[in-house]
Image: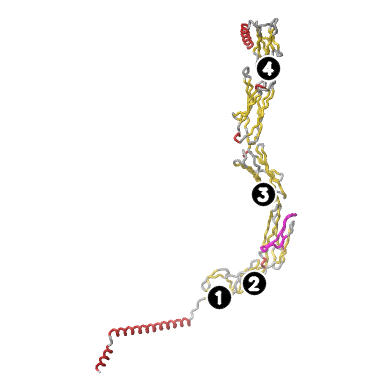
């Protein structure tokens, strides 16, 4: 049916040609520029005022129709990339007429591939790579790279002259920012054969942009010094990382991998692990953090030392007064490089050693006052300019008999009758002695408060004893009480009577003198009758 339709079209066009060109010999070919997919077929119409009409082609063909001035040829399989069939006719005495058809043979872009995108570092330049496979003709191809809906690159190939298919590689450098996270990148291929042919398009699968931002080295937190077999915490921190949750940590100590616990907060992440060093020396702590293609590391040196706690011993453990006690300070190790040892008490250093010692000794001749004396065994080790110290202390036990002195048991006690007093008497000694006081051979309660009466007065015989001896002391108690004095009382009463009598006589004399003076004054004021009688008598004489 297709061939019949094509033949009809060819015949129709040939009729028109015959009418329009009756006066001049001609030859034409339709279509002049056919666009054909590789391996497909196409019908060519050759029209001419001359005959016979022939077709010359290296392709397989068959005549599918003819008329007085035309012939139709079916190219059954276009399997050449630069086919140019020739249509010709012999016009008698004139030269031969011919015309070629210039084929455009194409192959659609069936496979468009965007190379997989790895995680990319923010601000760093990377290449986007797109490949279009087995496409022709390449001069009609346009490759466009998109980020989202925004074109990043439009690439054309107008200068490509080869008709055969080929692979096209398009590379475009790109630097991304955090805002580009999760954007999709695609590669679009368009084979534009218009107006004679179709527009053939294909697009690669989408690739999502995965970005990382990791510009600062990790920060390690670890002690500068550590003791063997002691647990220490180490940490590795990173900040300003994106996305922080995707950061991976690797911690190792002295070549052994650790099992860290990772926490994430915002744009920061931290890994912590526990370490128990087993040997002394300088050990390296390494933290490696990876985020996408970025890897950063940090390392610290931890100085691990061994310094056990010293042992302090007394031999004998418990000693009598005036015996020799060996005080030993030692380390429970076979070697102690760099260790300095000291034995001291509250008064200062008693004995010290040179470096690398593991034991020192001190002999002490015990006295009573040495009981409870504290000795300190101290060891020192200088590590990296820092002095590490450990010590052990112990108190010396000296055994001796009781001692009673005035400080703990006064020889004289003076009490007042009716007051509340406590009889106190104690003794020194180790072990602590038992103290007993008796009055009139009757035990008296020591350390018990009681009301004082006259019966408490007297001499108390106190004794103290323990395993290592005894001591005794007498304590005299004097009780002060009130006693009535008759003579003093009589004299006091007599004195009071005399004072009262003197006061009475004095008052009487004062009163009489005062009254007489008052009387005379009144008489003078009224006139004395006796005086008047005397005057009168004198006048008579």
Viewer-proximal residue among 215 and 209: 215
Nearer to me, 200 or 521: 521
- What is the C-alpha distance between the residues marked 2 and 3? 60 Å
Picture coordinates of residue 9, whole percent (x, y): 62, 10
Q: Main secondary structure of the magenta part?
A: strand
How is the rendered protein coloured?
Answer: secondary structure
Q: Position of residue 198 (x, y in %)?
A: 62, 19
Image position, residue 384 (x, y; %): 70, 52
Q: Is residue 350 magenta?
A: yes
Seen from the viewer's position, the closer of residues 28 and 328 is 28
Image check: 529 left or right of 83?
left
Query: Along the line of sight, which residue is nearer the eye, 418 or 528?
Result: 528
Q: Is residue 464 above or below residue 24?
A: below
Which quarter of the rendered picture does the C terminus lie within?
bottom left
Q: Nearer the viewer, mark 1 or mark 3?
A: 3
Q: Secondary structure at mark 4?
A: loop
The magenta stretch is: 326-352
Q: Is residue 156 above or below residue 359?
A: above
Tell me the number on the disc at residue 35: none
Q: Is residue 66 visible?
A: no
Numbered circle sitting on residue 39 = 4
What's the mark number on residue 471?
2
Relative side of 540 to 495, left or right? left
Residue that label 3 marks: 223
- Numbered disc 3: secondary structure: loop
Local crowd size for mark 4, using a 10 Å CA cut-off: few (<14), some (14–19), many (≥20): some
Look at mark 1 in the image and give the residue it sits on.
478
How much space separates mark 1 and mark 3, taking CA atoms?
A: 72 Å
Alpha carbon of mark 3 to alpha carbon of mark 4: how far? 77 Å
Circle nearer the viewer, 2 or 4: 4
Identify the mark nearer the N-term, 3 or 4. Answer: 4
């Amino acid at each position: 049916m297709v061939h019949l339709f094509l033949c009809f079209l060819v015949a129709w066009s040939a009729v028109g040609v015959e009418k329009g060109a009756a006066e001049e010999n001609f030859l034409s070919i339709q279509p002049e520029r056919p666009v054909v997919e590789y391996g497909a077929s196409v019908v060519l119409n050759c029209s001419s005022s001359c005959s016979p009409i022939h077709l010359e082609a290296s392709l397989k063909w068959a005549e599918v129709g003819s008329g007085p001035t035309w012939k139709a040829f079916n190219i059954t399989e276009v399997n050449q990339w630069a086919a140019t069939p020739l249509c010709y006719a012999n016009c008698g005495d004139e030269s031969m007429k011919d015309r070629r058809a210039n084929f455009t043979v194409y192959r659609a872009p069936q496979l468009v591939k965007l190379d997989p995108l790895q995680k990319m570092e923010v601000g760093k330049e990377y290449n986007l790579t797109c490949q279009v496979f087995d496409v022709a003709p390449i001069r009609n191809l346009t490759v466009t790279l998109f980020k989202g809906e925004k074109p990043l690159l439009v690439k054309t190939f107008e200068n490509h002259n080869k008709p055969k298919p080929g692979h096209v590689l398009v590379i475009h450098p790109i630097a991304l920012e955090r805002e580009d996270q999760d954007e999709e990148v695609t590669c679009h291929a368009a084979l534009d054969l218009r107006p004679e042919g179709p527009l053939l398009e294909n697009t690669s699968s989408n690739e999502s942009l995965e970005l990382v931002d990791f510009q600062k080295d990790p920060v390690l937190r670890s002690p500068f010094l550590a003791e063997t077999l002691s647990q220490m915490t180490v940490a590795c921190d990173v900040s300003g990382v994106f996305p922080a949750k995707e950061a991976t940590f690797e911690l190792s100590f002295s070549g052994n991998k650790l099992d860290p616990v990772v926490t994430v907060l915002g744009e920061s992440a931290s890994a912590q692990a526990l370490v128990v060093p087993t040997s002394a020396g300088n050990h390296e702590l390494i933290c490696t953090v990876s985020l996408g293609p970025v890897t950063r590391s940090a390392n610290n040196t931890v100085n691990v030392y061994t310094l056990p706690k010293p042992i302090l011993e007394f031999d004998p453990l418990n000693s009598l007064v005036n015996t020799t006690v060996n005080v030993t300070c030692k380390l429970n190790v076979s070697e102690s490089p760099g260790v300095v040892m000291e034995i001291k008490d509250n008064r200062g250093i008693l004995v010290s050693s040179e470096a690398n010692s593991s034991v020192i000794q001190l002999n002490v001749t015990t006295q009573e006052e040495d009981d409870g004396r504290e000795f300190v065994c101290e060891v020192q080790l200088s590590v990296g300019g820092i002095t590490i110290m450990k010590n052990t202390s112990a108190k010396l036990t000296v055994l001796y008999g009781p001692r009673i002195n005035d400080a703990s048991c006064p020889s004289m006690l003076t009490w007042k009758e009716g007051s509340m007093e406590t009889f106190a008497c104690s003794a020194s000694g180790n072990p602590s002695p038992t103290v007993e006081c008796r009055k009139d051979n009757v035990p008296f309660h020591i350390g018990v408060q009681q009301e004082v009466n006259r019966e408490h007065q007297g001499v108390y015989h106190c004794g103290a004893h323990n395993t290592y001896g005894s001591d005794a002391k007498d304590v005299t108690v004097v009780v002060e009480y009130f006693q009535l004095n008759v003579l003093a009382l009589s004299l006091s009463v007599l004195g009071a009577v005399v004072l009262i009598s003197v006061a009475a006589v004095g008052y009487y004399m004062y009163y009489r003198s005062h009254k007489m003076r008052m009387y005379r004054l009144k008489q003078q004021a009224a006139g004395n009758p006796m005086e008047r009688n005397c005057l009168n008598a004198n006048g008579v004489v």
